[in-house]
Structure formats: structure tokens, C-alpha cells
Amino acid sequence: MTGATTNADLHCHSTVSDGLLAPAEVVRRAQANGVDLLALTDHDELGGLAEARTQADALGLRFIDGVEISVSWGDDTTVHLVALNIDPANASLQQGLAQVRAGRDARARAMAAELDRVGIHGVYEGSLAYVGNPALVGRAHFARYIVAQGLAKDVKSVFDHWLAKGKPGYVAHVWASLEQALAWVAGAGGVAVLAHPGRFRFSGAELRRLLRHFKDLGGQGIEVVSGGHTAQQVGEFARLAREFDFLASRASDYHGAGESWTDLGKMAPLPEGLRPVWEAF
Ligand code: AMP
Ligand code: MN
Ligand code: MN
Ligand code: MN
């Protein structure tokens, strides 16, 4: 399989975390959109993979087991790693992710208390109607509840007003360390890819420091093409992939209609001269 002819989409979400489609629906939509290599990468959770794989097998779509891991790096900075081609039965990965998930409930209660202070009430309880597994409750579920209450026009504006770092409902949280997350991925036989580097609000120097640290700890790839990246960012991350000798990934980060920058499989191709991460599978 060559890089240019593959419509790979190696990062997306289902109702198992904060996506809007069930795992099998994600697979069907991906295939209808022309994807021929798909990874489901729910946040901190492997629970959708079996259903997705069963559907992918039935449709003859090549499927890769994945997960997006929440990581704390430095002083209250959250970054996301996408782990690809992992063994979902690996015990240390499962235990590590369970540990990451365990912090979400207390965080959600603290966020709701902050929102209560600025006049937005009942968000913790209300958000639970929007999450399949309460242990996975997060900001996207909060945002959907707040939109449904008529307090904002869409999910993005909820983040802009209340949930992004520095806003009243944001609560600092400690996720996995970069060391832990990379050890879990390596132990499960996977490839670790830095997710959507264009979404982090880093200076160029900070991003290079993160990439160096990530590589030194065994990180192998970065998302050069991500649904949220501009064409200019794709060029910038292609250069960084070459400089650091990273494998290059291509991903929509699809969550659902109206909540995503790009639909499944509808991203730009990888720029020339990169090593596609799927050649490592
Ligand atoms: P959490 O893991 O609870 O911190 O939630 C992170 C999730 O919130 C991301 O994976 C996205 O689904 C969503 N998200 C983060 N920032 C934004 C934004 N600016 N607009 C819309 N959704 C966002
Ligand atoms: Mn998400
Ligand atoms: Mn992410
Ligand atoms: Mn994601």
C-alpha cells in the first residue's frame, strides 16, 4: 500500500467517548466517504474497538485499533497522543487508561462548580444525558448540554466562552505523563503519534521541545494532516516531520456533524516526501 493511493483516516471518535456516532456507524460513514484504512481512537478508552472491527470486517475495510490518550506535559499543558495498532488486550495499557479515566468524574464536578458560580447551573447532571459512559464525561458533553439549554449557539462558542483554558469553567487537571503514556503504547505494541500539533497554543520553541521530548521517549509520528490544520500548518508540520524523522499521520479527528472541521476521509493528502505512519503497520 503506497502513501499516495491510501485514503487513511487514523483518528476519530465514537459515542464511546465524545463522538456522536456509534462505533459501527463511524465505520459505515468512513467507508461511504471512501476511507480504506481507518483507526477509531476514542479518548482514553478501548471499548468501541470490537464493534468497529466487526463492522469493518463485514465491509472489507482495513481497520486499525487505536486510542487517543490525554497527557499532561509541563505546567498545566494538556497534549493528546494517538496510539495506533495497539493490542487492545494489553493489560498495562488497559490499566493505564482506567487510571486516566478515573480522574474525569472529579474534574467534571469541579468544572460544574465553576460554571455554577458564573450562572450556568446543573451542568454535571445535565451533561450525563450526552455521554454513553459517565466515566468518560468531558468538555464536549458539557458543551452539548449548554447548547441544548439555549445558552450558546454552538459547541465551539461554548469552548470560546467557558471551557477553553483561561475561561471560567476550565479546571486544571493531571492526566497521564508523557513517559507513562508512551510506555503503555510501546508495551501494547503500538505506534505513538502526536495528535493535532496545530491545536496546541505553543510557541515554535516549545513545540520543538515537546517533539524532542516525545521522540526521546519513543514517540514515532505526528499528525501532519489533521482536520483542524490549515494548509500552512500542514506545510509546517511536514517540515518538522522531516527534521525530526517522524512518521506522518493523516486524520480527520471527526466527532460528528456540526462539531468537526472535516468529515471522515475528507482531508488533504499527505505532502510528498514523508513516510506515512501506515507503512509501519
Ligand atoms: P476533554 O478531554 O474533556 O478535555 O475534552 C476535549 C475535547 O473537547 C476534544 O477532544 C474535543 O472533542 C473538544 N474540544 C476541545 N476544544 C474544542 C473547541 N475549541 N471547539 C470544539 N470542541 C473542542
Ligand atoms: Mn474529543
Ligand atoms: Mn485531541
Ligand atoms: Mn480526537
Image (cartoon, rainbow, N blue to C red):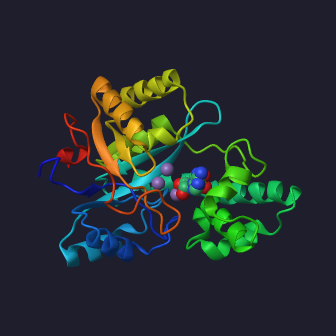
User: x and y percent of residue 161 in the render?
Assistant: 73, 52
| Numbered disc total | 0
Considering only vertical position in the picture, is 201 above or below 36? above
Considering only vertical position in the picture, is 2 above or below 50? above
Left or right side of 130 for 114: right
Residue drawn at x 41%, y 37% is 233
User: x and y percent of residue 56 in the render?
Assistant: 25, 72
User: x and y percent of residue 143 in the render?
Assistant: 66, 63
Q: Is residue 218 visible?
A: no
Left or right side of 120 for 138: left
Between 139 and 16, the residue placed more toward the observer is: 139
Q: Is residue 15 visible?
A: yes
| Quarter holding residue 219 | top left
| Quarter holding residue 275 | top left
Residue drawn at x 31%, y 68% is 30
Between 68 and 207, the residue placed more toward the observer is: 207
Left or right side of 104 for 73: left
Between 143 and 16, the residue placed more toward the observer is: 143
Residue drawn at x 32%, y 25% is 244
| Quarter holding residue 9 | bottom left
Residue drawn at x 35%, y 28% is 240
